[in-house]
Amino acid sequence: MTHADVGPAAVVSLREITAETVGVVCKLSDTLFEHQKRMVAANAVSIAEAHFEPKAWFRAIYADETPVGFVMLYDDPEKPDCYLWRFMIGGPHQKKGFGRQAMNLILERARSRPSAVEVTLSYVPIEGNPEPFYRCMGFEPTGKVEGGEIVMRRAL
């Protein structure tokens, strides 16, 4: 199955990355549009960072049996927020509803934590940024800027 063959009716799931799948998940970063590559770290970098951060939770985003994206949370059970650290859908898989389905799964995971009351995230404020998508998913700006990125939140 090629990248373009995965249709919007595919079932989205979040799966652990294995030795067999890490290569294809890392290569998804290469499929981003050029302006998007300035907004999110490469999946290989994110996976490496996750291995050195005990509170990192990361998964590949699948549409049926095809890896289409990557998500990483900073998930500290002692804190009331769950931080969406990285989120990406590969270029050929965008605009098919996979991001929306994956975000709903992420929110479901966050709701499963007894102490979590919100999900926070940040984005690079350049042209083509994901703010419209995040707003559509119920996130609102907090008024904070951290490291040059606009911070948003969504209550659970």
Image (cartoon, rainbow, N blue to C red):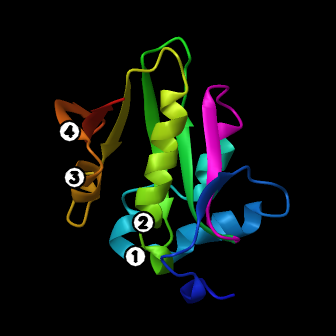
Tag 4: amino acid: Glu
Q: Residue 33 carries which label?
A: 1
Of the numbered discs 1 and 3, the one sitting upstream in the chain is 1
Quadrant of the rendered structure where residue 84 is?
A: top left
User: Would residue 127 appear left or right of 89 to someone viewing this image?
Assistant: left
Mark 4: few, some, or many residues within 10 Å (few <14, many ≥20)?
some
Q: In this view, does 79 lie above or below 121?
A: above
Specify few, some or many for label 3: CA neighbours under 10 Å numbering under 14, 14-19, or 20 or more. some
Q: Are marks 1 and 2 in contact (CB under 8 Å)?
A: yes
- Residue 132: image tag: none
Task: Read off the residue under disc 4.
Answer: 140
Query: What residue sits 46% from the left and 57% below the top?
Result: 101
Span shown in magenta: 50-65
Q: Mark 2 points at which residue?
A: 37
Under mark 3, the amino acid is Pro
Under mark 2, the amino acid is Lys
Is there a contact, CB below 8 Å, between mark 4 and mark 1? Answer: no
Closer to us: mark 4 or mark 2? 4
Residue designated by label 3: 125
Residue displayed at 64% across by 71% down? 27
Q: How far apart are marks 1 and 3 (CA)?
A: 16 Å
Spot the residue most to the left: 143
